Image (cartoon, rainbow, N blue to C red):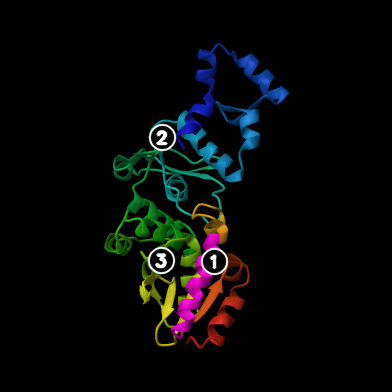
Amino acid sequence: MEQFFNDIKTSHELRHEGISPSTVRRRCAQGRLIRIMPNAYVDAHQWVQWDEETRVKARHASFIKTHQHYVLSHVSAALWWSAPLLRLPRKIWVSHPAPTVRSRPQVHVSRGREDICAKSTFHRGAFVTSPLQTVLDCAMTLPCLDALCVADYFLNRGLVSTKEVREGISLLKGKGVCTARAVAALMSDKSESPAETIARYRIVTWGFTPPQEQVSIRVGSSLYRPDFLWEEFRVIVEVDGNVKYDGSHGNPVQVIRREKQRQRDLEQLGYRVLRVTWDDIMRSPENFRALLINAGVR
């Protein structure tokens, strides 16, 4: 994130580098500079290399770099904390201590938040709301599943506790409080990925018996921690994330080989192992539901 503040140049910085406003306008017209927002520019060669998520982050950095006393909050704070978002924010969400500041196109301002802004944290080049406040704000403003992914992320990393979040949500009032209470009831500190959060959300909201999460099963000298376990039904669900096979967890071929061995070991103990993918839980959730029913989960 910090690199954005070097790549993005304000009008003031460009003037100090000897680049006049007329030269800036000419370079923009020539396609050599990209105007991200008023008074914020980036080299066009850099811009075309960024994917959509990176460009969204760059817009946030541009706003923060050109506006003082604003704090990234709500979904924008979640983005800056690197929480998983099911959809990128269409607007920049910020908080401001003054009660008279207004929102503008592409920027949503929560005003009069003097205490919240005073408790903000300087993180990766920008002031952002605290992890707890970010979870509370997202729980009040995002759809339930989106907010749940954010809450689980902060819980799993130990940045907030279940008790803190539930106590904070119990004090909330107004629009969005019903969704926030649902998040408090559904969240878990065991989910290690948004895919696991979504799978658990489906399982619970469909009315199935809640599974155990990340429990240890010993097979010989090996210790396995399946994502979800129903001991009474002898069923295990493993949520496959593509990140497992991108090389960050070792050679993909070896990763797949270990997973197949793990599945054989668990099946020899009498468990039925169901493997589900992102497509199963997001694009075709009824397929996932049918898998659970056919495996005997109730």
Please tell me which residue lies in front, 202 or 108: 202
Which amino acid type is marked by label 2?
A: Gly
Front label number (1 vs 3)? 1
Element assignment for label 3: helix
Amino acid type indicated by mark 3? Val
Q: Which of marks 3 and 2 is in front?
A: 2
Q: Give the range drawn in magenta.
A: 254-270
Label 1 SS: helix
Query: Which residue appears farthest toward the right when viewing the image?
Result: 30
Q: How many labels does the image show?
A: 3
Residue 171 position in % (x across, y down): 29, 61
Query: Residue 183: which numbered mark, if any?
Result: 3
Front-most of residues 178 and 266:
266
Q: Which mark is residue 235?
A: none
Q: Which amino acid does label 1 sit on?
A: Arg
The answer to which quarter of the image holds residue 158 is: bottom left
Q: Residue at x 36, y 59 (%)?
A: 156
> On screen, 270 above or below 284?
below
Q: Does the stretch in magenta take in 72?
A: no
The residue at the point 39 percent across, 72 percent down is 213
Whichever of callouts 3 and 2 sits on the residue coming sooner in the sequence is: 2
Q: Which of 213 and 143 is in front in this view?
A: 213
Circle 1 sits on which residue? 257
